Each structure stands twice: as C-alpha cells, then as structure tokens.
C-alpha cells in the first residue's frame, strides 16, 4: 500500500513523517541528551519522593559499571523483573549504557513461565525485586543466570524512609517469601561497588538490539520481539509528535507530568516513560494500581497532564468513591490500549474528567504504538485512530490482497518501529514478516475511507457459529451498555449443533442483574447467531498483569471449574 489516505485527517501541525536523520542515534544517545538538558528536573516521583534526571544518570552509570565489572559483555541479555519502582528505569538505562540487552520480565510470572523466558533469552544476569525472588529460586538452577541483583522497595528512598519501608515490607506485612539465591548481591551494594569504577562507553549503533520485549503469551508460547535502538527511538519520536500537540497546551513553565499505573515492563508504559524523558517530564510511579485507594491518593497529589490506561483500569478507578476527589482539570491526554475500550467506559470517563480517551493500537512487535486517535483532532469511537507518522497500515484478505474501505482484513503494518524479528525463531519470524517488510499482526480490522482503523478481533479469538464469524468485541460492547454490567468477556465454546456457541462471562455492578436481563438485551441488539448461548456471572475475570482479559484462560475452562483470575481471586458461577 503506497497511498496514505489518513494523512489528510492529521491535525494541523503534525508532519507525515518523523525525522530519523536528526535523531538516528541510539536510545542511549536520547537518554544522555535528556539527562544533560533536564538535570535538575524531577524525572520520577515514588512514594512522594522526587528523583531528578541527574540522579538517574549518575546512579545508572554506577550500576552500568557494576554490570561490566562482573564479566558481562556488550550484547549480553540482562533480565529485569521489577514492578514500578525507581530501580526499573535505572536498571534499564544502565543495561543500555553498558551496551547490553534489556529483557523485560513480568514480575507475576510463575516459576515455569520465568524459566521459559530466561532460557529463551539466554539472560546471564537478572535484576529482581526481593518480593519475587522465591519464584526465581525455584528455577534459576535450570537457566544461564550467573548473577542476581536483589532490589527492595525502599532502596531509592532517603533514610529513614527507606529503612522503614523495607522493614514494614519484610517484617510487618511479610510480603517476601523465603528464598536462598546464594551469591546474590543487593542493589545498594552493586551501586557502591560500581561507584568506584569507571564506566566503559561502548559504541552503540542504531541497529543494535536494545530490548527483548516478550509477547504476553496469550496466543501460545511467549516469544521475544527483537527491538533495536532505532525501533525504540522511532516510536518515541512518533509518540512525541503525536501527543506533543496536546502537551504544548500545558501552561508555560509547568513541567509535563504523567502518571504511570501500567507496569513499566509493558511496552505501552515503557514507551510513554521514554517519551516523558525525551520532553523533560515527570513520571509518577504507581506501584500497585490494584490498590485503588492508594492510586487515587497519589493522583490527588499531582497535576497530571497525561494518563495512560486501559478499559479495566478506567472502570476500577471510576467505581471508587474517591475518584472525584482527584483534580482532573489539568489532564490533557488520556490514552488507552491493550484491549478495546468500551464506548460506555469512554463516555463516563469524558463526563467525569473532561478528557476524551484517545484509544490506540500497538504491539510489542512494533515497539509500542501503531495507530492512535488524535488528541487534538477528530476522535472516532469505537476505533483506534489513524496510523502515526512514518507508518503504513494495510488490510489484507486471506490471499494477501488488500481489501477496500470498510471491509475486514488482517492488519499488516510497516514502519521504523517494526521489530527485526523474534529472538532465535527464524521460522516464526518468516511467517509474520513478509517480503515487503510488513508485519502480519494476526489482528482483524477494517479501515474507513478517511484512514481510521477499527480492530475487530484477534484471528484466534473469532467465534465461528454455523459458519458465521462472530467477533467477541462486538458482543462485549453491546453487553457493556447494559446497566448493572461492570465487565464482560465473550468466548467460543464447543456446540454439537453449531460447531461453536457464544459463552458470555459477566462481572455485575450490582446483584439485581440476572440472566433474563442480559438475554433480553442481547436479543434487542444482536442477531440470533451472535446471542450468547451460555451466560455466567463471576466475581472477576482472569487478566494479565496489565489488566488485559485473558480469553484463552476462559476458553480452557469448563463451566463447573473455578476461574484462575491471576490478579483478583474469584469464582465461576454457572447460571442455569
């Protein structure tokens, strides 16, 4: 596809392409420029404590020196298994400065999942929060990990707050399971050792590997997307151009502020964090967004201009009685990704905050963002907006031929942010990167005449009822409009008559809602074959660590089994 019809709908002031010639260096070059330019500004706020750009630069250099001193070499993968604590951006900056590869790891992984990723990446060292060390202890002997750096929540806090925080975590709340990990080194000790050394600055080229970003594993074995420095710099510049028009409306002299409730190891939060560093912004780190009371208390303490989230997070915040105590008047941009945003959720968020949710579309394989609704232009919901600068999007039929406007096809993308391939998986890489350089996403979507993209569903999430394609997101959007529904998810279930039938799982806002209400609503808004055959009410839905509903977990369960909700305990109650 050569025609970019969406460009005519770009907001005024937004260029069709980013200038990679001016910023064609590495992510380290980008970081160093920000550290130098914004040294005295606050880079991160954690537990009410400000950490400056200069501090992040200095401490990350000490940690980089330590990594080099223990025998790690340029190009070695180093795993980072941390939640939203200051040690995360410090560790990543250090790994990149040392010329190594950062391997983002979900802290909620089980020993089996962690072992797979450590083996697959070949990581030789890991930086991990002590809370999750017991998980590593159960599998580390079967991996190539030779060096373990243990972090505690209070490491970057000033004394005595650091000591109190760590004491409460260990002794009062007893949040740290027993582990051994002989030979491990504390983060604070690593910094002391590194401060006595001189950092060797290796030559880092734009095409060098910077990050291995593992897919969520919702559609099979988790794979590492190879993201180069060029991929990540490109997506930072794309996001800066896209959201810069809105951030430019912040009053002169006021530092841009983003809150970070999504985990930094997730590609959306990772890129958002890098964008804020690029523009000299402050990132308010939220350790546990599932603690809604604490999250809202943190938000009340800051003038937040940018807020990235997803449908489940928005719903959870708005359901809390303290939501309206936050001053949302400073909010310039609300972004959403990871899962479809229900129109009803978007409507209520706009009503209560004054900010329109700019839903976007991105993938680990594309270093973050592919499309987004313009924050200062025409937002078309439901939908994921226009391709960002320097990005091509094409919709393909099963033969690889491009479909016309409004027709459903597989989303294929091309741009400087698209990954080099999957780590050590040449065959799987060849299946998703075609000869033209397009990445075949496996997502089904349609694009209107103006270039606005709408994601219909994952190929593997599609339900086939009597030969008809049924898209779960359509059913979920309809049911979410019903008063009394907090969340819902639709999956296919085997059926002897129709091949598959629709199974709907609902989390109620109040117990007055029943099966009859849901079925009557669906009959009014959905054609016969799309209507749920089975309706179940649960306390919560199974979700990934970022709150994305895991349909694969739901499909794997019989109706008489309990749901493993991962983040929230809940049980499945079959409605008869």
Image: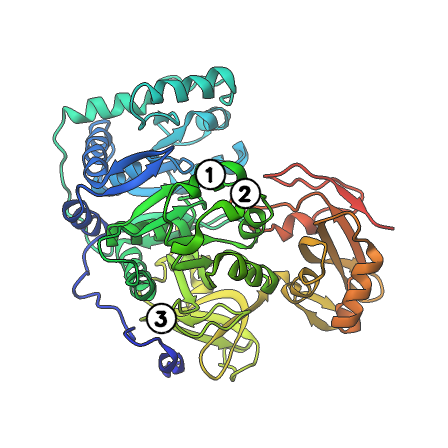
Q: CA distance from mark 2 to mark 1?
A: 8 Å
Which of the numbered marks, if any, corresponds to residue 373? none
Residue lying at 25% horizontally and 33% vertically, measured from the top left: 72
Tell whether label 1 touches label 3 (CB within 8 Å).
Answer: no
Mark 3 / mark 1, whichever is N-terminal: 1
Left or right of 443, for residue 25: left
**Apparent side of residue 368 relative to residue 23 in the rendered image (left or right):** right
| Count of numbered tags | 3
Q: Residue 78, how many percent across, how many down?
A: 33, 37
| Residues tagged 2 and 1 counted as in contact (Cβ below 8 A) | yes
- Can see residue 208? no
Corner quadrant of residue 41: top left
Q: In this rendering, which labeled residue sits more in front, label 3 or label 1?
A: 1
Residue under label 2, please give it: 322
Q: Is residue 548 above or below residue 198?
A: below
Q: Which residue is more in the foreground, 386 or 430?
A: 386
Question: In this figure, which colouring scheme has been used for the structure?
Answer: rainbow
Identify the image quadrant of the N terminus.
Answer: bottom left
Q: Quadrant of residue 123?
A: top left
Is residue 264 visible in the rendered image? The answer is yes
In the current view of this chain or complex, which residue is farthest to the top? 171
Nearer to me, 192 or 344: 344
Q: Helix, strand, or loop for circle 2?
A: loop
Q: Is 448 placed above or below 482 here?
A: below
Q: Which residue is mark 1?
A: 297
Residue that mark 3 sits on: 391
Q: Does 261 sit above or below residue 407?
A: above
Alpha-carbon distance for marks 3 and 1?
39 Å
């Amino acid at each position: 596809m050569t025609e970019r019809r969406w460009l005519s709908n770009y907001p005024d002031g937004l260029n069709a392409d980013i200038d990679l010639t001016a910023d064609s260096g590495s992510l380290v070059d980008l970081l160093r420029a920000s550290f130098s330019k914004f040294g005295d500004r606050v880079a991160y706020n954690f537990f009410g404590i400000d950490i400056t750009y200069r501090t992040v630069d200095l401490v990350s250099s000490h940690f980089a020196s330590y990594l080099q001193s223990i025998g790690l070499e340029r190009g070695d993968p180093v795993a980072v298994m941390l939640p939203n604590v200051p040690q995360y951006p410090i560790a990543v900056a250090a790994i990149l400065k040392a010329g190594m590869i950062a391997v983002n790891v979900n802290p909620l992984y089980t020993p089996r999942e962690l072992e797979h990723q450590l083996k697959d990446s070949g990581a030789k060292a890991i930086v991990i929060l002590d809370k999750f060390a017991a998980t590593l202890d159960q599998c580390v002997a079967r991996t190539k990990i030779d060096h373990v750096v243990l972090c505690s929540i209070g490491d970057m806090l000033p004394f005595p707050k650091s000591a109190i925080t760590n004491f409460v975590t260990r002794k009062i709340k007893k949040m740290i399971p027993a582990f051994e990990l002989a030979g491990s080194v504390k983060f604070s000790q690593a910094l002391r050792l590194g401060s006595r050394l001189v950092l060797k600055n290796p030559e880092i080229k734009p095409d060098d590997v910077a990050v291995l970003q593992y897919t969520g594993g919702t559609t099979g074995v988790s794979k590492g997307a190879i993201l180069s420095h060029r991929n990540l710099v490109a997506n930072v510049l794309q996001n800066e151009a896209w959201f810069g028009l809105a951030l430019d409306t912040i009053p002169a002299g006021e530092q841009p502020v983003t809150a970070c409730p999504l985990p930094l190891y997730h590609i959306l939060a990772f890129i958002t964090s890098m964008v804020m560093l690029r523009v000299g912004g402050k990132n308010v780190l939220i350790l546990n967004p599932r603690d809604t009371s604490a999250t809202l208390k943190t938000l009340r303490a800051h003038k937040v201009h940018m807020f990235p989230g997803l449908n489940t997070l928005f719903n959870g915040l708005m359901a809390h009685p303290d939501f309206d105590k936050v001053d949302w008047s400073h909010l310039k941009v609300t972004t959403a990704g990871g899962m479809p945003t229900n129109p009803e959720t978007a409507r209520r968020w706009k009503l209560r905050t004054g900010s329109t949710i700019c839903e976007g579309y991105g993938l680990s394989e594309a270093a973050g963002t592919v499309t987004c609704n313009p924050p200062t232009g025409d937002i078309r919901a439901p939908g994921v907006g226009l391709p960002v600068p320097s990005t091509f999007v094409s919709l393909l039929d099963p033969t690889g031929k491009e479909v016309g406007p409004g027709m459903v096809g597989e989303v294929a993308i091309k741009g400087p942010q698209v990954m080099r391939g999957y780590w050590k998986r040449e065959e799987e890489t060849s299946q998703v990167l075609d000869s033209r350089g397009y990445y075949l996403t496996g997502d089904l979507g349609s694009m209107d005449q103006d270039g606005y993209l709408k994601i219909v569903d994952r190929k593997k999430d599609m339900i086939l009822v009597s030969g008809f394609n049924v898209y779960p997101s359509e059913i979920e959007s309809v049911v979410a409009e019903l008063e009394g529904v907090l969340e819902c998810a639709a999956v296919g279930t085997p059926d002897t008559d129709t091949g598959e039938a629709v199974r709907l799982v609902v989390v109620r806002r109040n117990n007055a809602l029943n099966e009859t209400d849901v079925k009557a609503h669906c009959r009014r808004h959905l054609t016969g074959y799309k209507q749920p055959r089975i309706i179940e009410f649960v306390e919560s839905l199974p979700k990934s660590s970022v709150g994305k509903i895991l349909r694969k977990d739901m499909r794997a369960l019989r109706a008489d089994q309990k749901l493993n909700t991962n983040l929230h305990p809940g049980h499945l109650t079959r409605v008869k």
